[in-house]
Image (spheres, rainbow, N blue to C red):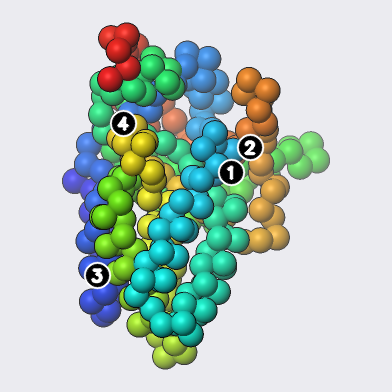
Amino acid sequence: MRKEVIFTGNDTVKELYSKFRLSQGSLFHYTSMTAIASMKNSSSLWITQSDSFLDKSEIQFGLDVVRHASDCTLKLQERKVMEEFLLGISEILKRSYIFSLTSNSSNQHLLENYGNIIVQFREGLPREILGTAWHSVPHGDSYSLHYFNDLYELVEGYVVYDEIEQFEIAKIAVKAIMELGNPTTHIVDIYHIRKLLITCITLFKGCQHRKEEEYRVTIVRKYDKTDNDFNETRDNNGKKINYIKAIIPHFEEYCIEDIKTGKKTGSGL
């Protein structure tokens, strides 16, 4: 069973963590035969930059939910402080990458829209990405390795589609920021609230996407100065897609449990 141990003395931070569940058991990714062949041949995952999705509101949607909660619960001067905080988070999330999964091994909507090859990943996949993945970059006559643990932080969780639930979680996030946004706050709690706000923003999605039943892994770049060093691009029906490759040692052995062809019903429901 996957667990996360949290060290904090702040009750609002504890409450906010309780709103997000870690996946238990296998996770599934719907894709094409061509994509899975590339994945296996390169021993890597291709993780898409958040602004490359067809839905341009991938990150903006979550930011808008938190802003709405701020407008409804804070006084004017507090809202100004909150907006500065959100602008900083918005800049950070421009360097974010998303890998979409689900706990549903027979989701007809995903079969119809994303591919009928279903990759069954082991439950420890997010840990493998952050703990063991690297970028391999040509350097002279050889290669240099850049480890994900040094470059990125990772947040994960089930996407929240319900508007009322999103608003209630966002209000807790706003409350936590107001409680901790002062010079006396312990650095550990500053880390927690930053991570939790990123989690909220990246896991809020419009209710029209509910059929995707998404479990989302978001990779966020820690530093500004090298934010494009590892980007690659590919063409998808004339659209430029930015992504990063996460090379994982023993990829098939440690990450993949099974690969199967899903059966479409033709209804897409």
Among the two numbered marks 1 and 4 on one chain, the one whose residue lies closer to the N terminus: 1
Q: Which mark is residue 211?
A: 4
Q: Which mark is residue 14?
A: 3
Measure how far apart labels 1 and 4 are at the Cα level. Answer: 21 Å
Measure how far apart labels 4 and 2 are at the Cα level. Answer: 25 Å
For residue 111, side relative to residue 99 (left or right) = left
Among the two numbered marks 3 and 2 on one chain, the one whose residue lies closer to the N terminus: 3
C-beta proximity under 8 Å, tags 4 and 2: no
Amino acid tagged 2: Asn
Measure how far apart labels 3 and 1 are at the Cα level. Answer: 31 Å
Crowd around label 4: few <14 · some 14–19 · many ≥20 (10 Å): some
For label 1, the residue is 51
Furthest residue toward left: 1
Q: Residue at x 63, y 45 (%)?
A: 145
Camera-nearest residue between 24 and 44: 24
Q: Nearer the viewer, mark 3 or mark 1?
A: 1
Is disc 3 placed on a helix, strand or loop?
Answer: helix
For residue 23, side relative to residue 170 (left or right) = left
Q: Is residue 67 visible?
A: yes
- The image position of residue 112, as x and y in percent, is 38, 17
The image quadrant that residue 73 belongs to is bottom left
Amino acid tagged 1: Asp
Q: Which mark is residue 242?
A: 2
Q: Nearer the viewer, mark 4 or mark 2?
A: 4
Among the two numbered marks 3 and 1 on one chain, the one whose residue lies closer to the N terminus: 3
Q: Is residue 109 above or below residue 181?
A: above
Is disc 2 placed on a helix, strand or loop?
Answer: strand
- The image position of residue 164, as x and y in percent, is 26, 55
Q: Is residue 149 visible?
A: no
Among the two numbered marks 3 and 4 on one chain, the one whose residue lies closer to the N terminus: 3
Is disc 1 placed on a helix, strand or loop?
Answer: helix
